[in-house]
Amino acid sequence: MSKVVFSPPTSWGDKGGSGCCGATRTPPIPPARREEALISLRGRGDKRGVCSQSVPAVSPYFSRGTKEGWSVFPLLAGGQKGGLFLLLFALLFCGCAPRMALMQAVRTDISSSQLEKAYQFYAKKVAKTERVDELLNLGLLAFEAGDYTTSFRTLSDAERLAEERLTKSVSRETAALVVSDAVSAYQGTVFDKAMLHYYRGLGFLAQHNLESATVEGRAIAQYLEVNARESKRTYKDDGFLQWFSGSLYDAYGQANDAWISYRRAREIYDSGYYALREPSFLCPVTLAAVRKVGHSESETELESECPAAAESLHSDWGRVIVLCEVGLAPPILEEDILLPIYKNDPHHFAGDDERGRFAHDLALRRGHDYQYGSDVTLDYFLRVALPYYGADYVGSGVAQVMVKDTTGREIPAELAQNIGAIFRQDLSDRQGAILVRAITRALIKYAATKAAESAGNRHNEALGRVLGAMVNVAGVATESADTRSWETLPDRIYAADFELPPGTHSLRAVFQDDLGGALFRHDFDPVEVKPGEIVFLRARCMR
């Protein structure tokens, strides 16, 4: 079995920016989980920084000024009591602005490498939270601050709640359809759930608990295997996480499982994984695993693919893995769009299906300008709020990372994971459904506004206009996009995987801009490299 050393970093030169610091005792694994881990580890079985400002979701109330008092913007729900209820509902559930302000403050602290300050501030603000996005952010901030006990607990809570919320809450989903997507129970993305195990694995490595770290590596592999079979979105499997999982297997002495993960990682990168090239170290480590397994046919094939590695692998050397995380993942912002509703469009619907079909038709009008004087007559504009990523967001100024040792040797850390690209593609995959749902919600709000006006008109027109305005204002207040995400993740991850001869080595990670200038230097504590052992190192540059 290989021994793993997770080296905490020591900053040098520029202030700020750190990886894992400090150490606490490893919390015991629950008996059920430990038994599962031990059974699982016996065999695998089958193959298996600058934050953009968001656009506020506020629109004024406009009236056509006609006898009917129709509202240009479709708003909220039914009758005088319904309007008052929904105004209260908006106050209770639409906490988007405070959340965005909180995350802006946290991102500012992180960008200036004040990780402990960011952690303590955020932990105080979200104490006793049961929101998945807040637990994910808190878990990573605790990890960065070296509070592994809190990190393990909160990330486990996030995983548990995400699983529980796969069973939809009828009340929450109904509220989301009528009020805003932001009131639905956030479950996290598929990528979130995979990265959760990555950070738990790193936390266990930081505490020299290779067994539990390998359990997390197995969880990554198994989760991705299921997702690759069932997902209809772009993110199906993960080349970087498969390599990381394989490295944990390798460290634990499970060469066959390591080979399977490495091979899968190569397949993913070769398929055009978010426009990333296969890291040059992946073929050599796959070859080394195959040699341990003793599969001669695969060994011959790999030797032809990476002939230099076939001659240079040293069975009596150790292996060093350096993970270099940079920047902050992009935040989700909000934009308001207006869709034209024409006089000849349907204004009443026999049921949800008919309304849904019309919502699909309306979605096609996005981006099409209304031309006055055309063959159709404008009735009103439908306002909806949508999430988006800013095109001008720059997650990090880092363009390349070099790992240097005391002999002057330089090993490039290669871009292995583009989290910003994964985030953007995932939202793009969901955007069509989000738009149709937002339009459907706006149509319901508009119908509720008209119903409130009609109810008031039974008494007098003035009351009708007042009730319509109340429901209208409530709709504006509650219409917001769902901007929740795991914002404390890095924007990109660079990785270096190389061999070193036995002995003590001092290593430094240098984060450089596109001109080769050093943005940040990060010295690791001296590491002892021994034959057949693996050393895991991690650094994070917030610039």
Image (cartoon, grey):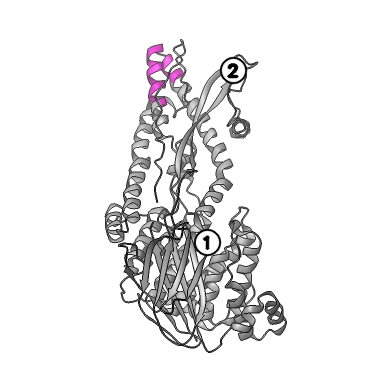
Which element carries disc 2, helix, strand or loop? Answer: loop
Q: Position of residue 224 (x, y in %)?
A: 57, 64
Q: Is residue 455 above or below residue 493?
A: above
Residue 343, disc? 2
Residue in the picture at 68% in, 84% down = 295
Q: Position of residue 134 (x, y in %)?
A: 38, 54
Report the magenta stretch's main SS: helix
Compare residues 462 and 340 and report the one nearer the observer.
340
* Of pointers 2 and 1, the one earlier in the residue sequence: 2
The residue mark sitting in front, 2 or 1, is 1
Q: Quadrant of residue 262?
A: bottom right
Q: Position of residue 127 (x, y in %)?
A: 29, 55
**Residue corresponding to mark 1:** 417
Q: Is residue 172 left or right of residue 116?
A: right
Can the viewer see residue 39 in this picture?
no
Q: How far is mark 2 from mark 1, CA to CA?
A: 50 Å
Queried whether the magenta region covers residue 484, the answer comes back as no
Residue in the picture at 64% in, 73% down = 47
The span shown in magenta is 453-472
Residue in the picture at 44% in, 61% down = 512
Say which amino acid is labelled 1: Gln
